[in-house]
Image: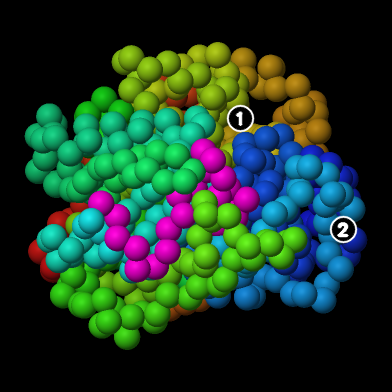
Amino acid sequence: MGWPKAKPSTLFAGVALLHLKDKPPSLHKFTSKELRVLMALYSRGIHRSPAFPFLKPFLPLHFRFNFPIQTPNLRSFSRSHSTPSHSGCLSAIIPSHREFDFKYNWIDGAENLEKYEPGGYHPIMIGDTLQERYQVVDKLGFGGYSTVWLARDLRLEQYVAVKVAIADGPDRDSLRHELKALQALSTPPSSPYVQQHRGCGLFPLILDEFEIHGPNGAHPCYTTVPARCNLRDVSYSRLFHLDVARALAGGLALAVAYTHSKGYVHGDIHLSNILIRLPSSLDQLSIEQLYKEYGKPETVTITQCNKNPLPPNVPAKAALPLYLGKKAEEFTLSEVGAGVLLGDFGEAFEPASDLRQGKDCHTPLAFRAPEAHFEPQAPLSYPSDIWGLATAIWEILGMKAIFSLEYTNINKIISQHIDVLGPLPYPWWESWEERDLFFDGNGKPKEGRGVWPPIKEAFEEGVQKYRRMDKIGEFDREEASAILDLMCRMLAFRPEGRPTAEEVLNSEWMMRWALPCFQRSLQAQ
């Protein structure tokens, strides 16, 4: 059967309906002006709007997969995904419209400079010292509601990541919510099984929190141990060795089990939110030695489009994010034990006290549990994390995601769920109004549409085949059977049919393969 091929599709960006003919999205290049429009759309929450599925296939990979943007290698990305000569697909978007009336000249790889305004980003420059304690050394990344900086803690002589939120708006509350969840996870675990496996250490624990005041307002901040990279960035480069993949999966399952034992649902489990911690040996490097090892910060002067001087609430230069990651195959067992971190708790909630309905789920479609769509008024709970955990483990083990990461919409994802996992529960099938677009009256896929392979075939084609091609080791028949048994249970359509996180830890594959590798990774440090 095989995997369906991607096709060029329609782009709808709120103010224009365009069509790119005879050019696959992966080959499309963007001018600086077009990238500026894309970033403006991103900053205005386009990834959470109905328009995003149409825009997504034409975005460069880091824009498609990183919402909010984490720590992509934007220094190289910005150079490889833009070209000054191409006329572009967004020329029909009216730049004089107030929505896209830019003040500042676009800088490839930088945050949205238009958000340096009252209520927005705090202006930070390399070399600044925050709280008379944290000397800013480089930028690690940015998102729609924060910037993240690598800083030297002058008091403790160690490196930290400083997350600086915008000064106003609902996204500021998201940071406070994330702080609350991470603080709860820093207390001792109640589950002996999770405690035994050190699940409590698999989070970016808060080291310090404070508020800074600047020309754009008051900005909540917190510091954590810095991460090397997220697994989405790493997933672009080949595959993990077998034991490393097992250890990552085991550590992630422990982190989710611990999160649930503390009464929280993470709410957004996917590879962009799974981090690898930097080695503690980094702290031994002086700032000068760090620059010698990883390169000096790359900065670009910010200028106004009207050529007027910059206002005082905008930094003089924009820093491009530093990338500290490496190829998947280069990671060793000792690096991924206590090094794996489950991050970004901005969507976390407590089911016992915080009602989160399916319609309010912001998990990307490829990783979103189906009850969020079919039961939009029903409260989400721990089983929605189990679905996301399964999709993340699948990607860690192989090359292809189990469901599409490319251009998609909810109905295409549902059709893929059925292709891979089998028939929907009858009430869901009957309520799915668009089913006739994908299936005939007998429930068989309609002729001519791309059909995704069933789960056993998907494992062979998306995991085993690529591991053989890369000569990096494949799973033997017994282990593959245990993996598939666990995946099928975790991807049960009905949430009540999925195992709990503790039951996942007690599964055959976790007990015989994943958790022993995770334990060995701890001993190898």
Query: Can you say which quadrant of the picture contains the N terminus?
Result: bottom right
For residue 295, which quarter of the picture? Answer: bottom left
| Residue 330 within the magenta-colored segment of the rendering | no
- What's drawn in magenta, residue-wise? 111-131
Tell me the residue that label 2 is attached to.
91
Q: Amino acid at mark 1?
A: Pro
Asked if disc 1 and disc 2 are in contact, CB closer than 8 Å, the reply is no
Depth order, front residue of 420/384: 384
Q: Amino acid at mark 2?
A: Ser
Closer to the chain start, of discs 1 and 2, is 2
Label 1 crowd (10 A; few <14 / some 14-19 / many >=20): some
| Residue 120 within the magenta-colored segment of the rendering | yes
Q: Position of residue 311 (x, y in %)?
A: 58, 55
Tell me the residue that label 1 is attached to.
423
Query: Can you say which quadrant of the picture contains the C terminus?
Result: bottom left
Depth order, front residue of 143/278: 143
- Residue drawn at (59%, 66%), measured in percent from left and top? 302
Label 2 sits on a secondary structure element that is loop
For residue 286, which quarter of the picture? Answer: bottom left
Label 1 sits on a secondary structure element that is loop
Q: Position of residue 325 (x, y in %)?
A: 39, 70
Q: Main secondary structure of the magenta part?
A: loop
